[in-house]
Image (cartoon, grey):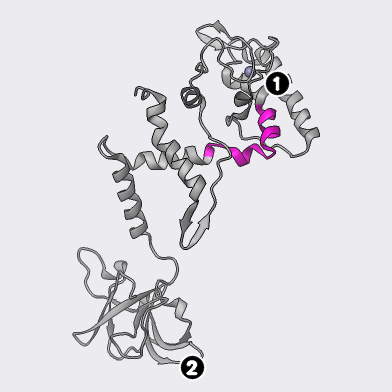
Amino acid sequence: MKKPEPVEDYLEDLVEELVRIQERGIEHEGILFEVKINAVICDSPARAFAKCIKGHNAYHGCERCEAVATRVDGRMVYTSHATFERRTDDKFSQVYLSCLSLIWSRDRHIWSTSEDLLKHFVDGSTEFYGDTFPVYNIHSLQHLHEDAASFKCSLNDISAFPFENHMQAIKKMVRSGQNPLAQVSKRIAEQEYAKPSTRSSLKRCYVSTKSRDGCFILADEIAFVREKRGDGMLVADVIRLDDAHDLFEKPCRSKLINIAYVEKEMDVAQRRVLEKKELLRKAVCLPFSEGFAIFPLLHNMD
Ligand SMILES: [Zn+2]
């Protein structure tokens, strides 16, 4: 895909929005969050594009220093012993590289040790890995300590990897080139809707001892509420799903989808005291044959 041109048009909406939320903050559930941009995280091609500078494969591809690359076997290589002057433009030194997930201590002593070790590694790398090894990414290792010093934090705190990983998940949601944002939004909504409930979704659900409001599905049991105690606990007759019968067996056994048949006498039930949070889902209990057919309700009972 071609890069959009010009960069001003491409970034205009983003810049406007960022300016606005930095001025006004973001309100979420009644709380106003202040937003401050600390860093903009880009990979090398995107950084060169956004800053309108030479790409990382150019002869003067390093934005941190004046090292000049040479072409070796078709690759742009920064020869290990090339001396390089730091670029002085402050804007250049503000941007950091997020190509390695290294742990950096806040301790200055360790920064300089890391600087020496990385320089040693880059300088000696051609000996082990060949002349084509020190490409832009390897050369950039020598500048990593500048970022740790500049941001005064571990590089893990300013790593692009979490975003990059999440990007993969988002990309998989887009199936065609048309309306990608709408596609992503719909897929996320579907996922949230379909998420199986691991905790009780019945906080505000009406529970009573009457059969129409007294039947619930627990983790692997069915409960019939018989008494609501003053302390909030419930007394119930509980039947293990294993002890209940299938209401039907085709196209699959009904208990697979929590639909069951229980006999009127409920000989297999045990009387137990339950906490309300054990009730995972409300169920409909309908008279059927000599007993009851139990169907779980999909939705909350708000
Ligand atoms: Zn450099």
Q: Examine the rendered structure and indicate whether residue 183 appears above or below residue 148.
A: below
Question: Nearest the camera: 233 or 86?
Answer: 86
- Classify residue 134 by image quadrant: top right
Residue 42 in view in this figure? yes
Q: Which secondary structure lies at badge 2?
A: loop
Q: Secondary structure at mark 1?
A: helix
Q: Nearer the viewer, mark 2 or mark 1?
A: 2
The quadrant where residue 143 appears: top right
Residue 85 placement, left or right of 179: right
Q: Work out whether residue 144 or residue 225 is closer to the camera in this orientation and state it.
A: 144
* Residue 130 position in % (x across, y down): 62, 11
Say which label, 2 or 1, has the lower sequence index.
1
Give the x, y percent position of residue 82: 68, 9
On residue 121, the disc is 1
Range covered by the magenta-colored residues: 144-161
Q: Residue at x 26, y 67 (%)?
A: 253
Q: Which mark is residue 230?
A: 2
Residue 266 in the image, given as x and y percentages of width and height: 33, 88
Indicate yes or no whether the magenta region holds residue 156. Answer: yes
Q: Amino acid at mark 2?
A: Gly
- Give the residue type at disc 1: Phe
What's the magenta bit mostly, secondary-structure-wise? helix
Q: Residue at x 51, y 45 (%)?
A: 22
Residue 193, image x, y percentages: 33, 59
